[in-house]
Image (cartoon, rainbow, N blue to C red):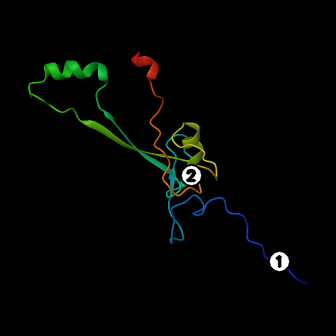
């Protein structure tokens, strides 16, 4: 009997993970849906925002005794599973071929939300 050993098709060179030579990595819980996801596969973002909402910033600056007081910021590390990151438009699905595809080795273009060209007019 002859068995032809064929290599399975691989979608991504790194199998969607950053676990290069490690056998096992710890799991994290997605901040959106609480799904278990490997730490190296999770999509991680740093969310930086002001502790005070924008409506109250001017009132606090006027009431402050310290001149040029810098209001503290809130730094939150958010970790998503792949499904939630795609659903909430944090990452986008990329085709295999073409510019910006998975096989294109150049980094993908930065996506900075919807542009407000109509609001400026």
Q: Which mark is residue 83?
A: none
Q: Is residue 101 left or right of residue 4?
A: left
Instruction: Determine the image quadrant of residue 34.
Output: top right
Q: Residue furthest bottom?
A: 1
Split into 4 quadrants, where in the image is the N terminus? bottom right
Could you say which is closer to the camera, residue 26 or residue 86? Answer: 86
Residue 88 found in image quarter: top right
Question: From what the image shows, is residue 50 above or below residue 36?
Answer: above
When the figure is inspected, residue 63 is found, relative to residue 6, above or below; the finding is: above
Mark 2 vs 1, N-terminal side: 1
Residue at figure coordinates x 9%, y 28% from the top left: 67
Q: Secondary structure under badge 1? A: loop
The image shows residue 119, relative to residue 2, as above or below, that is above
> x, y (%) of residue 9?
72, 64
Q: CA distance from mark 2 to mark 1?
A: 37 Å
Residue 82: give x, y in percent of width and height. 57, 47
Provide residue 49's location: percent of width, then percent of height. Answer: 33, 34
Image location (x, y in percent) of residue 42: 51, 52
Tell me the quarter of the image containing the C terminus. Answer: top left
Please tell me which residue is depicted at 43% across the width and 45% down the height of the picture: 45
Which residue lies under the disc numbered 2?
A: 36
Residue under pointer 1 = 4
Q: 10 Å neighbourhood of mark 2: few (<14), some, or many (≥20)?
A: some
Count the marks: how many?
2
Do the numbered discs 2 and 1 sit on residues whose CB atoms are within 8 Å? no
Element at badge 2?
strand
**As drawn, which residue projects farthest toward the right?**
1
User: In front: 68, or 110?
Assistant: 110
């Amino acid at each position: 009997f002859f068995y032809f050993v064929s290599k399975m098709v691989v979608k991504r060179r790194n199998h969607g993970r950053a676990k290069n030579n490690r056998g096992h990595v710890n799991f994290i819980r997605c901040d959106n849906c609480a799904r278990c996801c490997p730490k190296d596969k999770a999509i991680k973002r740093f969310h930086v925002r002001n502790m005070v909402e924008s409506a109250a910033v001017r009132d606090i600056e006027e009431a402050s005794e310290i001149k040029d007081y810098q209001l503290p910021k809130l730094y939150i590390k958010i970790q998503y599973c792949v499904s939630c990151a795609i659903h909430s438009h944090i990452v986008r699905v990329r085709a295999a071929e073409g510019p910006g595809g998975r096989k294109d080795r150049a980094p993908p273009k930065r996506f900075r939300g919807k542009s407000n060209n109509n609001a400026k007019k």
